[in-house]
Image (cartoon, rainbow, N blue to C red):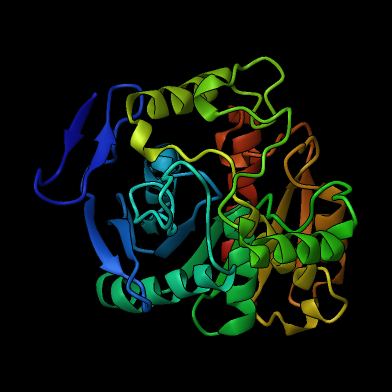
Amino acid sequence: MTIVVDPDGPKLASDPANPMPEGGRVGYFRAADGVRLRYAIWPKGKGPHRGTVCLLQGRTECIEKYYETIADFRARGFGVATFDWRGQGGSERLIGNPKLGYVDKFSDYWCDLKSFHGEILLPDCPPPYYLVAHSMGGLAALFAGVNDRLMFERIFLSSPMVGLESPPFGTVGAARILGAMSFAGLGRLPLRRPQDKAATKMVFADNPLTGDEKRFTRNVELLKAHPELEIGAPTIQWTAAAMAAMAAAQRDDFPEKLRVPVLILAAARDRVVWTPTTEELGLRLRTGRHMVVPGAQHELFMETDAIRAQVFAAFDAFITEQS
């Protein structure tokens, strides 16, 4: 595997199985609270310009994982701007163990996105702006739509993390218990389930992420070649923050606060987030709707060609429809 771009600056990994799209620019910016984040931007491909897609990843993910998806958006006439969330990918890690997922509070992700919008997206990327987000990024995107309805024209979500299957004590109760544990000084300890495995230790058979073996293997090999990009178990504090955010998104009054057109895609066979909770939210949206993708697992952009074709067909129709 080779490393491209300025050897003295931030880097992106590229290899024949996962080539970095040409014409990109990589750099660092600082969020409003000083955390250093890695970003990358690409111009559109051929054809007329249609705007810029701001692509938000899920927990544990990194820019490199989305090269294929970035190329798909560029081929549609969109520029792409993306960054690694604080605490993962090539961005600054927040605690002593860089392999653990950590955040002080979920609103810190809003700080990341708002800073990216002001520091990179507005000055360097042509409008209009469309927010595309997966999993944890999807939950952050929903709060972005509540906090500022003018930042993005539309929001397109893939398997957003708005609920988990039967969390102990319910979402609110789990948030309170884990918050108390964190307050007691346990927040930086990992929270693992017996079935959890490191990404580099997973095998394709019965994996909960995708039904496409080639893309699954590509993503595992990326992290094996670049272990500095890998994130393992979440901490108690991260989980407490995420549970509190999910509980807020499940409140009856949350959908009415969302004033941006939204399309939510849920995966019918999702074993990472709880699709029924996503459907409940979708049914209550005033400015959006949802659809369930048959046969799909959690990572819709990493799924089989047939499922990805459905995802992009939904995106194309959503972006071009009249508000």
Q: Residue furthest front?
A: 184
Res 143 quadrant in image: bottom right
- What is the x, y in percent for residue 255? 79, 76
- What is the x, y in percent for residue 194? 73, 29
Answer whether residue 119 is visible to the viewer in this image. Answer: yes
Quadrant that contains the C terminus: bottom right
Closest to the observer, 310 or 145: 145
Above or below, comparing residue 228 to residue 107 in the picture:
above
- What is the x, y in percent for residue 247? 79, 67
Res 222 quadrant in image: top left
Residue depicted at x 59% and y 68%: 106
Residue depicted at x 82% and y 68%: 250
Above or below, comparing residue 193 to residue 73 in the picture:
above
Q: Is residue 280 left or right of residue 41?
A: right
Above or below, comparing residue 292 to residue 181 in the picture:
above
Quadrant that contains the N terminus: top left
Above or below, comparing residue 293 to residue 305 in the picture:
below
Closest to the observer, 166 or 57: 166
Answer whether residue 317 is visible to the viewer in this image. Answer: no
- What is the x, y in percent for residue 72? 44, 43
Closest to the observer, 271 or 301: 271
